Amino acid sequence: MAKPILIANWKNHPDSLKEAKNLLKQLSRDRSLYKKLFFFVAPPSPYLESVAFYKDFIRTASQDISSVPKGTYTGVVTSDILKSFGVRIAILGHSERRALGETSSEVAEKVKVALRSGIAPLVCIGETVRDADGEHFEFLREQLKLSLSCLTCKADASKLVVAYEPVWAIGKDAKNAIDSKDLSQTVIFIKKVLSDLFGREIADRIPILYGGSVEVSNADVLLQGTKIRGFLVGHASLNTENLKSIAKSLISK
Ligand code: PGA
């Protein structure tokens, strides 16, 4: 069985390098636990090197990449630079970036750039509202297809990770996250779309993660029969005790 995946998305936290280093030091006390997972931390870019220092148990992730090619672009950090900091996976198309105007075509471009730099693309999709008629499934299909439209070969598709993050559930609490029945249905649907795009064999190899108000109190429930491979965790990842409990849920699933 492949190891579960846990990604800590720190967003814009903590407020200082000193606090980031402190958080990492606290995480390192449980390194033997995290080694049982594919454990990633996606910090704000200036903290990448500090995260990479702990490469014995943390894999470095970035929260985005730039799609601009090599050249002179003030203010841009290229994917090759990220790669040189040890970044192995990039969160792409997170809903908070889409809310700033990023389109699925731009996400598709970034998928291509990430692969070119040897960084695995973690493509986020998620509906803003869920309705009883299931209209959101069509939305998810389109968002996924467009976000992956630059993938030309199956070999590249097999490096993908997909995160299902319903926008309405992000940054809330366990009570407002999705329930396992709805999550299970959505995962089956995403697998079907991936299978239509790349064939069953490749689709089966693409891990699907869930993100959106994953907390200690709902981690077990979200894993029950839902066929997700792991979690993308935002606010709960900033508390090392909470993250440890979530990691334990994944290990014992
Ligand atoms: P949350 O964030 O766990 O705070 O809901 C998840 C995410 O935005 O990736």
Image: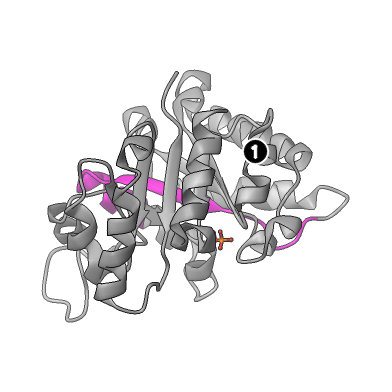
Residue 20: horizontal and vertical position, in percent?
30, 68
Answer yes or no: disc 1 within 8 Å of ligand 1. no
Q: Position of residue 184 (x, y in %)?
A: 70, 35
Q: Which amino acid does the dot numbered 1 rest on?
A: Asp
Q: Residue at x 65, y 55 (%)?
A: 166
Q: Residue at image x 31%, y 48%?
A: 29
Give the residue drawn at x 47%, y 69%: 97
The percent coordinates of residue 204 (x first, y second) are 51, 23
Quickly name the residue at label 1.
220
The vertical placement of 13 against 82, above or below, is: below
Most extreme residue toward the right is: 132
Q: Is residue 148 above or below residue 65?
A: above
Secondary structure of the residue carrying tag 1 is helix
Please tell me how crowded label 1 is: few (under 14), some (14-19), or many (20+) other residues with Cα within 10 Å. some
Q: Is residue 113 left or right of residue 42?
A: left
Image quarter of the N terminus: top left
Q: Is residue 64 visible?
A: yes
Using the image as rendered, state which of residue 199 and residue 27 is in the foreground.
27
Q: Magenta span covers which residues?
A: 110-130
